Amino acid sequence: MVPTTKVHSSPSLLLLLILLLAIYHHRHHPVLARRPVETENEDGFCFKFRVHVINGLSSNANPLFLRCWSLDDDLGEHHLYIGGDFNFKFGLKVFGRTLFTCFFEWDNKNQHVDVFRDNVEANLCCDTQTCFWRAQDEGIFFSVDSQTWDKKFNWTSSVV
């Protein structure tokens, strides 16, 4: 008689495998793997955000046209006049990416901007849980506090 070995499948083995996968995902997820930072937020964690897109252009002759979307949602088209502010809030996805993109168009110029990426802006905007983007005559600017602005993109000329 030849000895045979049996492979036993048990619910506890499956549970252990699921637990190991969850731990691995938690340690390697771009946001969940972050060490929590001290913030002014009540819970001390950065999982909810608001993004502002502001018209900082010098003239209302051509209002800023804006269309924003995520991987899951279309946030619609907007026409912003000087000082106009389109903003939206959201929570980070636990599984998958959180990404919001906006198409800016003004006076035969345009630019596509990823206004929120879970591996970039989530870290930059964590303290206030708010990111700011502003269209100006010179290009597209970014801020975490709406006081100090850094130019991130030049306008691209639209082909007519």
Image: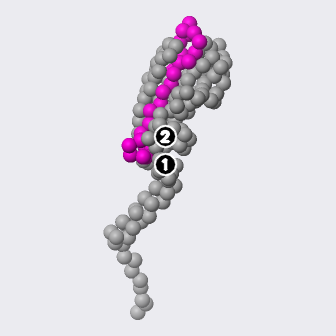
The relative height of residue 12 versus residue 18 in the rendered view (above or below) is: below
Instruction: Please identify the residue farthest to the bottom as the structure is shown.
Output: 1
The relative height of residue 159 versus residue 17 in the rendered view (above or below) is: above
Give 22 or 121, whichever is nearer the viewer: 121
Q: Secondary structure at mark 1?
A: loop
Residue 124, given in percent of the width and then of the height, sits at 54, 40
Q: Which residue is mark 1?
A: 37
Give 104 or 160, whichever is nearer the viewer: 104
Q: Which residue is mark 2?
A: 127
Q: Residue at x 52, y 35 (%)?
A: 116
Residue 28, given in percent of the width and then of the height, sits at 52, 55
Residue 137, given in percent of the width and then of the height, sits at 63, 17
Amino acid found under the numbered disc labelled 1:
Val
Q: Secondary structure at mark 2?
A: loop
Amino acid found under the numbered disc labelled 2:
Asp
Residue 86, given in percent of the width and then of the height, sits at 46, 23
Q: Residue at x 43, y 59 (%)?
A: 22
* Total numbered circles: 2
Q: Is residue 71 visible?
A: no
Give 126 or 74, whichever is nearer the viewer: 126
Callout 1 environment at 10 Å: few (<14), some (14 to 19), or many (20+)?
Answer: few
Q: Residue at x 44, y 41 (%)?
A: 40
Instruction: Please identify the residue farthest to the left as the structure is shown.
Output: 11
* Mark nearer the N terminus (2 vs 1): 1
| Residues at marks 2 and 1, CA–CA distance in whole angstroms | 8 Å
Callout 2 environment at 10 Å: few (<14), some (14 to 19), or many (20+)?
Answer: some
Q: Is residue 19 magenta?
A: no
Q: Residue at x 44, y 64 (%)?
A: 20
Question: In the shown orientation, is residue 115 left or right of residue 7?
Answer: right
Do the CB atoms of the residues marked 2 and 1 lie less than 8 Å apart?
yes
Which residues lie in the magenta part? 41-66
